[in-house]
């Protein structure tokens, strides 16, 4: 929300007082003086007037998990273990998953309470590459790369997938980079050629690479540098 709106929502200031506080440079957001009424205040921002804290700002939380096979990318499931069960953290109900993985897909999963941040990672418009290591039942033909680069029509959603880059590593293994996260996207792309994906592992989302020190099921908090990169 805009800082002027945030301030005038407080019972103690009217709009004119808010305008004055900003002009007088008495408002700080995260320690920086703010005079632009459009400046954004988030639930994570600390807002102060002179030396008085008006909002402490709740901590933003970001985790990288190495998702193992056989667990659900959901916050709750009646039957199976969920990825949140793997986190030993308080207030897990506030967290959400930035880009789910299927039950048997392994690899990089990002979990956060910051919706803006996770949208930047997952929205197709931002075109951040999601990179997967893929193993298939049949050989991967030379025509796959051209078809994936041109985009595939998905009748259910009535859309054509964004251009994707395929690097064939061996007859039945490849690295695929896609910029969206449609339902079962990778399996459906290979399914176009009647080729079943038998192993799928996400290595990277945009600038964030799965930490090789994390064994399946382990997680760590993201560093400030990693958070800023997105
Ligand atoms: N595409 C899939 O088909 N499954 C995943 O888990 C991720 C991408």
Image (cartoon, rainbow, N blue to C red):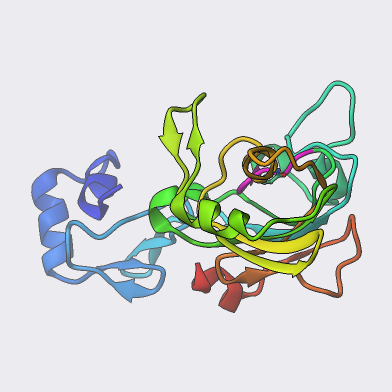
The outermost residue toward the bottom is: 225
214 in magenta: no
| 88 relative to 104, above or below | below
- Residue pictured at 80% horizontal, 47% vertical: 105
Residue closest to the eye, 217 or 15: 217
Q: Is residue 99 magenta?
A: yes
Picture coordinates of residue 56, whole percent (x, y): 49, 57
Q: Nearer the viewer, residue 195 or 56?
A: 195
Question: Residue 120, percent across and down?
Answer: 46, 55
Label tally: 0
Q: Main secondary structure of the magenta part?
A: loop
Viewer-proximal residue among 102 and 91 = 102
The quarter of the picture where residue 181 lies is top right
Give the magenta-colored segment's residue range: 96-102
Q: Position of residue 126 (x, y in %)?
A: 41, 57
Q: Nearer the viewer, residue 16 or 203?
A: 203
Please state the horizontal and vertical placement of residue 129, each as a whole percent of the image. Answer: 54, 62
Q: Is residue 208 visible?
A: yes
Q: Residue at x 62, y 43 (%)?
A: 189
**Residue 121 seen anywhere in this rendered image of the structure:** no
* Residue at 16 percent of width and 53 percent of height: 18
Residue 20 appears left or right of 69: left
Looking at the image, the residue that sits furthest to the top is: 78
Q: Is residue 179 left or right of residue 221?
A: left
Quarter occupied by residue 190: top right
Question: Which image quarter has ligand 1?
Answer: top right
**Left or right: residue 143 compared with residue 89:** left
């Amino acid at each position: 929300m805009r800082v002027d709106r945030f301030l005038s929502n407080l019972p103690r200031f009217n709009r004119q007082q808010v305008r004055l506080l900003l002009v007088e440079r008495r408002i700080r957001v995260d320690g920086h003086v703010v005079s632009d009424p459009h400046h954004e205040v988030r639930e994570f921002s600390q807002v102060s007037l002179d030396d008085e804290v008006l909002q402490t700002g709740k901590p933003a939380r970001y985790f990288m998990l190495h998702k193992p096979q056989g667990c659900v990318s959901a916050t709750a499931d009646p039957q199976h273990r969920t990825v949140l069960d793997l986190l030993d953290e308080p207030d897990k109900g506030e967290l959400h998953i930035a880009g789910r993985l299927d039950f048997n897909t392994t690899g990089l999963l990002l979990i956060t309470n910051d919706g803006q941040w996770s949208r930047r990672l997952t929205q197709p418009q931002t075109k951040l590459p999601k990179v997967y290591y893929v193993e298939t039942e049949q050989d991967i033909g030379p025509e796959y790369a051209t078809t994936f680069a041109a985009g595939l029509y998905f009748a259910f959603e009535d859309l054509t997938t964004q251009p994707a880059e395929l690097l064939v590593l061996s007859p039945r293994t490849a690295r695929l980079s896609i910029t969206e996260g449609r339902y079962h996207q990778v399996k459906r792309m290979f399914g176009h050629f009647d080729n079943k994906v038998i192993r799928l592992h996400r290595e990277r989302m945009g600038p964030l690479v799965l930490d090789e020190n994390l064994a399946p099921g382990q997680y760590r908090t993201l560093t400030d540098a990693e958070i800023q990169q997105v």
